[in-house]
Amino acid sequence: MWLSPHWDAERHLSHPPGPDEVRELFKAEPEAKGMLLVTPNDYGTCGDIQAIAEVCHEFGKPLIVDEAWGAHLPFHPDLPPWGMDADADVVVTSVHKSGAAVEQSSVFHLQGDLVDPNVLKAREDLLATTSPTSLVYATLDGWLRHMVQHGKELLTATLALAHSTRAAINDLTGLRVMGEAEFLGEELAKSPDPLKMVIDVSALDISGYQATDWLREHQRVTLGLSDHRRVVAQFTHADDHRTAGILLDALSALVKAADDFETPPPVDLPSSDELQLETVMLPRDAFFAEVEQVDADQAVGRISAEMVTPYPPGAPAVLPGEVITKEVVDYVRSGLNAGMELPDPADSELKSFRVVARKP
């Protein structure tokens, strides 16, 4: 069962759901085995893990938190709560994203008695490699030791640097760093990660896709995320005034160059309801079904046999087993034309879609 996120229709942003939605879902679906909550999201907005954990535990269900962007959270009191401190049962963390370990360095944490550690280990063994690299373990252990000993000091400096950099970016004409005023509210997020710089570039009359491509090509600065109107920069404990200065210089150059950009192609943005596709087959059944490749206009009303995922952040717009709609086809095709990355469709140009074959 899918649980709808909080949706900001004005800014076209989603935020983690709240405890009331979780409670209603467990009442409606008593056979649900637990909940998987993604927080923080790639824009740095966080859900109310403590309140959601309390609801899950009322029903005797475990809460699993995908905290891919939260490796730094346990090490400073001015950051949003870490899942383990907020009573989650399992927390999965990608240390290579906001920590300092090599790629693929992810860990999971377990507490409480709602998840059997032997079962968890057995299932992890099904997915993990039988040939792990010592480099992954070494960087995980080294980073953890470093943060336990020096993390608060390092992150105190990083938070101050992020604060001053945020103010400097806001002084650049046409740029605005989004923050609590845009992110927080009863139907929005519980807290933001102050180390995420979500920069709205729409006042420059350019898209985030254009900004990211230009910064990479002309300034050798690579940002982690872009969309139709924003770019996102991530600060970590490894940043200092030198790296912050590189970002500021690159953004200043972007502001000066923006007048020469072509008008960005429009992206057909659906409403939150239009993004909620109907699931009529189990994803596994649709993926392994007999399939065919059909033209984009013929895909409407058909059952998808593939994922179509704007990346980053990697949240699928279409999943196997869902009925494809015109609104979502227009969204992903116009997004691709505007610069959106879509790594998984069989047809990289999205002139056609992979769908479940019709039965004779």
Image: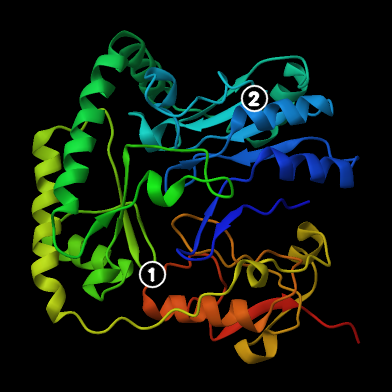
Q: Which mark is residue 228?
A: 1
Viewer-closest of 291 and 241: 241
**Relative image position of residue 263 (x, y in whole percent):** 26, 84
Res 299 → quadrant: bottom right
Q: Which quarter of the picture shows residue 85?
A: top right
Q: Looking at the picture, how far across and down is residue 242, in whole percent?
A: 8, 37
Of 245 and 108, which appears nearest the observer?
Answer: 245
Residue position for label 2: 88
| 12 to the left or right of 307 | left
Give neighbour class at mark 2: few <14, some 14-19, many 20+ (Cα, 10 Å).
many
Compared across the picture, whether 162 is left or right of 22 comes to left
Q: Secondary structure at mark 2?
A: loop
User: From where the camera sits, is residue 143 visible?
Assistant: yes
Is 189 placed above or below 226 here?
above
* Label 2 to label 1: alpha-carbon separation: 34 Å
Residue 125 visible from this viewpoint: no
Q: Residue at x 65, y 36 (%)?
A: 127
State whether residue 325 is above or below residue 126. Answer: below
Q: Name the image quarter holding the C terminus.
A: bottom right
Q: Which amino acid type is shown beneath numbered disc 1? A: His
Q: Earlier in the sequence, mark 2 or mark 1?
A: 2
Residue 227, x across and y down, in percent: 39, 64
